[in-house]
Amino acid sequence: MEKEIWYHKLNTYFVIFYLLFSFCLMGFYLFNGQLYYAALGLGGILLLLLPTVFERAYNLSPVYQFHFLAYCFLFFSYVIGLVMQAYHFIPLYDKIMHTLSGTLGMFLGVLLFYLCKDKQEFQKQDYPLVAITSFSVSMAIAGLWEIGEYLISLFFPCDPQRVAETGVSDTMQDFIVCMIGALLWLPFLYRFYRKDKADFLMNCLLIFFKKNAKHSHTYNQSRL
């Protein structure tokens, strides 16, 4: 658990940086009368609460490596990509973030699988079903994201799906790179179930279930 202590400290510094950066962006947009982007900046600050809200809602112990992962993704995908408009000015930035979201969607799919499983025990025979479930969750998240972008375009003067410029091409490319991101994690998932070698994401899950073992019926401590 030494890494958890280190990540706890790292999160404190990163959140301070995140907040200062976001407040500066909000001030800039307010000064220039761009209220829409100032409101987006406020939304980015509120999103920081998501990991803590999730944990408190289900009475879970925090996993600080997971917090750091969530904060980093929120910063680069939302604050940099959306609030700073990097999606419009940096080539392929949007595709890179969608690829990463596919990988993280797989991660959330594995987490969901074991939260729903009667015995939260990592077993080798789980791999085929875990792979199918996590891939499906990742693609479902991609679909919900695109639905969200479509709804935003209906109520706000923006075109996040770039329909006017690309038709359906941008949306379909987002789905494709998300699928690629999901598939890229499959070898690491396979290595964990076949060779007991955990990458950063699987290590987050192992720590999560170790710290929250009281919520499970059975937990295989030998995996840690």
Image (tube, rainbow, N blue to C red):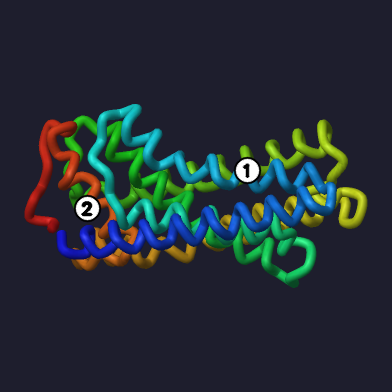
Q: Position of residue 15 (x, y in %)?
A: 44, 55
182 relative to 52, above or below? below
Residue that sits furthest to the left in the current view: 222
Q: Residue at x 34, y 27 (%)?
A: 57
Indicate left or right for 165 with 80 as reference.
Answer: right
Give the structural element (helix, strand or loop) at label 2: helix
Foreground tag (1 vs 2): 1
Q: Earlier in the sequence, mark 1 or mark 2?
A: 1
Q: Is residue 162 visible?
A: yes
Question: From the viewer's perspective, is 104 left or right of 84?
Answer: left
Q: Check if mark 1's residue and mark 2's residue have beta carbons within 8 Å.
A: no
Question: Which label number is shown at residue 19?
Answer: none
- Residue furthest bottom as drawn: 91
Horizontal side of residue 224 vs 30, given as left or right: left
Q: Residues within 10 Å of mark 2 (few under 14, many from 20)?
A: many
Instruction: Identify the residue shown where x is 77% and y is 48%.
Output: 30
**Left-right relation of 132 to 125:** right
Residue receiving disc 2: 206
| Image quadrant in which the C terminus is located | bottom left
Mark 1 → mark 2, Cα distance in angstroms: 33 Å
Q: Residue at x 87, y 40 (%)?
A: 157
State the image quarter where residue 154 is shown. Answer: top right
Estimate the x, y position of residue 78 in percent, counting from the top left.
61, 53
Query: What label sits on residue 42 in the rendered view?
Result: 1
Q: Is residue 96 above or below residue 214?
A: below
Residue 169 against residue 108 in the figure, above or below:
below
Amino acid under disc 2: Leu
Q: Helix or strand or loop: what does disc 1 sit on?
A: helix
Which picture quadrant has residue 185? bottom left
